[in-house]
Image: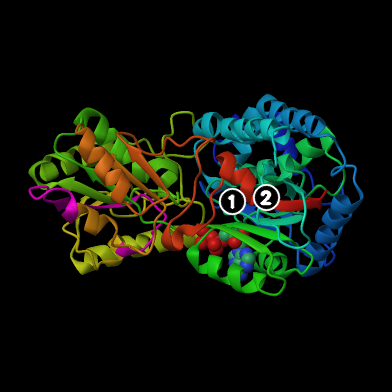
Amino acid sequence: TVAIDNQLLPSVRNFLGQPKRLLIGGDWVDPAAGETFPTVDPATGGVLCQVPRGRAIDIDRAVHAARVAFETGPWTTMRPNERERLLWRIADAITARADEFAQIESLDNGKPASIAKVSDVARTADLFRYYAGWATKLEGSTVNVSMTRVPDGEFHAYTLREAIGVCGQIIPWNFPMLMAAFKLAPALAAGNTVVLKPAEQTPLTALLLGEVFLDAGLPPGVVNIITGFGDAGAALAAHDDVDKIAFTGSTEVGRKIVDAAKGNLKKVSLELGGKSPNIVFADADLDKAVPGSVNAWLSNQGQACVAGTRLFVEDSIFDEFTRAVAEHVARTKIGPGLDPDTQMGPLVSQEQLDRVTGYIDQGIADGARVLTGGKRWGTEGYFVEPTVLVDVHPDFSVVREEIFGPVVAAMPFSAADGVDEVIAHANDTIYGLAAGVWTTDLSNAHRVAKRIKAGSVWVNQYNASDLALPFGGYKQSGWGRELGADGIALYTQVKAVNIAL
Ligand code: ADP
């Protein structure tokens, strides 16, 4: 049932063979109702193993454990430099087990293990190290207060930056391990406790992270991991004893999170969908812009919220450029993630395969022309050919909606009257997560960067983000910014102390 079974590490074989449990209060426990669900290898559709199905009652147990850990220590009374060392230990353990993490991520999600190792796993470890440093650098400030009226007199005021408390974190399946790290690392650095709900399609690396946390000596209840479906996520978002909910996933579910969080007005941060523009001017360095523009939408099998799936190419180079893009992607080596030669793996699930091929079919029915790709690849597993569509209209669903698969819609634009035309098209979306611009004209680059309504703009590259840079969405792509200093701000709250002297 596992693609390329002979490539499996003994530790991975062993992990897959072990019974899986929920992590609550420092113990691996069975879900209250004893239910399980299968997680599958998207390269074959075969079952990898059974995973516990946590329900609202398990979320409640986990929230209680996180509350006890937050209120009674030792976590919240631990010195920041001890928290820092603990996070480094976690990072080192992840690095030491990088091959194991990469294989499990590949098996569960489909992505090539070789890429998972240097990208997902390496960045996860980097994130724990980056935020480890923040543990000792959280500061308030002293404030000159001159407008305190009652009582009259002299005052001394300062701010404290404190943990928020119990944080619920709900993550998607496209970068299972990295999304866990995006959320856990800053939350832990700031001294919060967490209940993590991984995506039902990809629960495995989160469970392996749980092992790493216990081995590293993270106190009981600081991180609790509940595998399960949307009902478990909904219970977490609605729970009255959760102080903050962080969510990454679809805009549709993001709206439900906001609704569910209303009861106790818990803090909410959201990282949602995108339909990002990638703009190529005729003066761009095309040797870089062609592979870079492919990476923009094909990276991670196209299952990336930042994917540059609306490719705007200046009209004078449109035919030449799109042909070069099509030729480049047609060479992509497709196969199971554990095959070391694989550049592109399967999509995560049958549902995703159906959704993506459905969008391609709709695009063709609407009148789009396929330059390359256009259908399912092979007969086993959830593979789709990388697909380049041209002759598209701004109203087509392939241009408007997030497909979350290896599909790009390319459109020409005129720059004869400056950047207004392409900016108008690029911003014609409900989303605002990311954008790319390729040009050797410095003024053009800055002009576009300024006028694009998106949280990240990449110039002469696409996807190279940095853990120190804020990441998040304009418009319906989200609330708040993860990573960098903003990421710490999401997991802390500020208290103002004003003292009458
Ligand atoms: P995608 O569309 O990319 O599969 P979703 O937004 O559906 O992503 O799911 C992202 C995460 O949100 C998953 O962990 C999923 O289980 C969870 N989820 C789904 N529905 C809900 C909900 N109503 N409330 C909270 N979490 C949910």
Q: How many labels does the image show?
A: 2
| Residue range corresponding to the magenta coloring | 400-421
Gap between marks 1 and 2 measured at Cα: 65 Å
Going 76% across and 43% down the picture, which residue do you hit?
210
Which quarter of the frame holds ligand 1? Answer: bottom right
Cβ atoms under marks 1 and 2 closer than 8 Å: no
Q: Residue at label 2?
A: 145
In the figure, residue 117 lies in which quadrant?
top right
Going 50% across and 62% down the picture, which residue do you hit?
250
Q: Residue at label 1?
A: 46
Left or right of 433: which side holds 196? right
Left or right of 226: which side holds 260? left
Left or right of 483: which side holds 457? left
Left or right of 9: which side holds 342? left
Work out whether 319 lies above or below 396.
above
Label located before the other in sequence (1 or 2)? 1
Marking on residue 259: none
